[in-house]
Image (tube, rainbow, N blue to C red):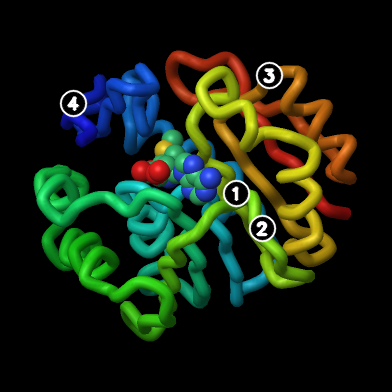
C-alpha cells in the first residue's frame, strides 16, 4: 500500500515503495498539479465546454483542482479519469486536499471519491465525472477530448507508458485544437509525442523542475 507523505507546500502525496516513486513532486503536490494541469492546460484550452481525459486518476487531485477552478465560471467539464489501480478508501480519506480549501469547495473532493466507477456521475451542474477502471494501453477512442492530463509515473519507472504507440492512441482520442500537458520534459518523451503527430512546446516547470511539456493536436 502506498505511504502518505507531506510535500514542501504542505499538501500530501503518496510514495510507492515498489517503484521508489511518488504520485506528485515532493516540492509541492498541489503546486505542481496547479502549474502543469490547471495553468498550462485548463486555462489555455479554448471553449467553455471542456472534455478532459486524465491518464492516471490516482488521488483525484487533478480532478479536484479542475472542479475548484471552474466553480462559478461559465465553464463546464466532462472529466474522464482512467486508472488501472484504484486507491483504497482508507488512503483517500487520509489525504489533506479538501482541508486546504474552504469547506464549500473541499467537500467536492469527497464527492469525487464517492462517485461509482465506470459510469457518469454529475458532481454538480458544471462537472460530470467518469472514473474508468482500465489500462491506457487499450485506449481506443476517436476525436473526443479537448484536454489531456498525462500524469503517468516517470518514464524511468514506467517506460512502457511514454511510447509513440501510447501517444498515438491519445492523439486519436483528441479533437483538433486540443492540448496535452505533462510534467515531464525528457527529450525522448518530446520526440515520441512529435512522432505521434503533436506540436510540442517546452514551458517553465513547477518548483524543482526546469521545464514541462505542452503538446497540441493542431
Ligand atoms: C503519477 S501517479 C498520478 C496519479 C494522479 N494523477 C494523482 O494526481 O494522484 C500515476 C497514476 O497512473 C496509474 N497507472 C499506472 N499504470 C497505469 C496504466 N497502465 N493505465 C492507467 N493508469 C495507470 C497509477 O496507478 C497512478 O495512479
Mark 3 or mark 4, which is nearer the start of the sequence?
A: 4
Would residue 97 appear left or right of 171 to someone viewing this image?
left
- The structure residue drawn at horizontal position 32% and vertical position 26%, both measured from the top left corner, is 28
Q: Which mark is residue 186?
A: 3
Q: Quadrant of the C terminus?
A: bottom right
Mark 1 or mark 3, which is nearer the start of the sequence?
A: 1
Q: What residue is disc 1 on?
A: 41
- The structure residue drawn at horizontal position 67% and vertical position 47%, both measured from the top left corner, is 180
Number of other residues with Cα within 10 Å of mark 4, as a class: few under 14, some 14 to 19, many 20 or more: some
Mark 4 or mark 1, which is nearer the start of the sequence?
A: 4
Is mark 4 in CB contact (under 8 Å) with mark 2? no
> Which of pointers 3 and 2 indicates the residue nearer the eye?
3
Is mark 2 in CB contact (under 8 Å) with mark 1? yes
Q: Quadrant of residue 156?
A: top right
Q: Quadrant of residue 108?
A: bottom left
Asked if 45 appears above or below 212 in the picture, the reply is below
Query: SS at mark 1?
Result: helix
Q: What residue is disc 4 on?
A: 5
Mark 2 or mark 3, which is nearer the start of the sequence?
A: 2
Query: SS at mark 4?
Result: strand
Query: Gap between marks 3 and 1, in whole Å?
Result: 19 Å
Q: Which mark is residue 85?
A: none
Query: SS at mark 2?
Result: loop
Mark 2 or mark 4, which is nearer the start of the sequence?
A: 4
Residue 95 position in % (x across, y down): 16, 44
> Relative to the observer, which residue lies in front, 177 or 116?
116
Amino acid at each position: 500500500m502506498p505511504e502518505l507523505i507531506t510535500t514542501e507546500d504542505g499538501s500530501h502525496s503518496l510514495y510507492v515503495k515498489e517503484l521508489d516513486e511518488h504520485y506528485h513532486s515532493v516540492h509541492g503536490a498541489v503546486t505542481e498539479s496547479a502549474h502543469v494541469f490547471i495553468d498550462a492546460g485548463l486555462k489555455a484550452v479554448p471553449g467553455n465546454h471542456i472534455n478532459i481525459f486524465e491518464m492516471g486518476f490516482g488521488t483525484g487531485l487533478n480532478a479536484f483542482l479542475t472542479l475548484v477552478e471552474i466553480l462559478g465560471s461559465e465553464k463546464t467539464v466532462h472529466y474522464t479519469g482512467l486508472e488501472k489501480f484504484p486507491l483504497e478508501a482508507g488512503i483517500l480519506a487520509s489525504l489533506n486536499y479538501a482541508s486546504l480549501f474552504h469547506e464549500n469547495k473541499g467537500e467536492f473532493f469527497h464527492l469525487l471519491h464517492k462517485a461509482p466507477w465506470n459510469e457518469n456521475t454529475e458532481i454538480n451542474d458544471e462537472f460530470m465525472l467518469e472514473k474508468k477502471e482500465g489500462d491506457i494501453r487499450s485506449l481506443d477512442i476517436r476525436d473526443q477530448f479537448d484536454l489531456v492530463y498525462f500524469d503517468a509515473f516517470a518514464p524511468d519507472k514506467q517506460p512502457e507508458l511514454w511510447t509513440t504507440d501510447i501517444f498515438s492512441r491519445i492523439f486519436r482520442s483528441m479533437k483538433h485544437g486540443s492540448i496535452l500537458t505533462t510534467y515531464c520534459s525528457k527529450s525522448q518523451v518530446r520526440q515520441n509525442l512529435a512522432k505521434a503527430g503533436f506540436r510540442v512546446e517546452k514551458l517553465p516547470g513547477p518548483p524543482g523542475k526546469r521545464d514541462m511539456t505542452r503538446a497540441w493536436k493542431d
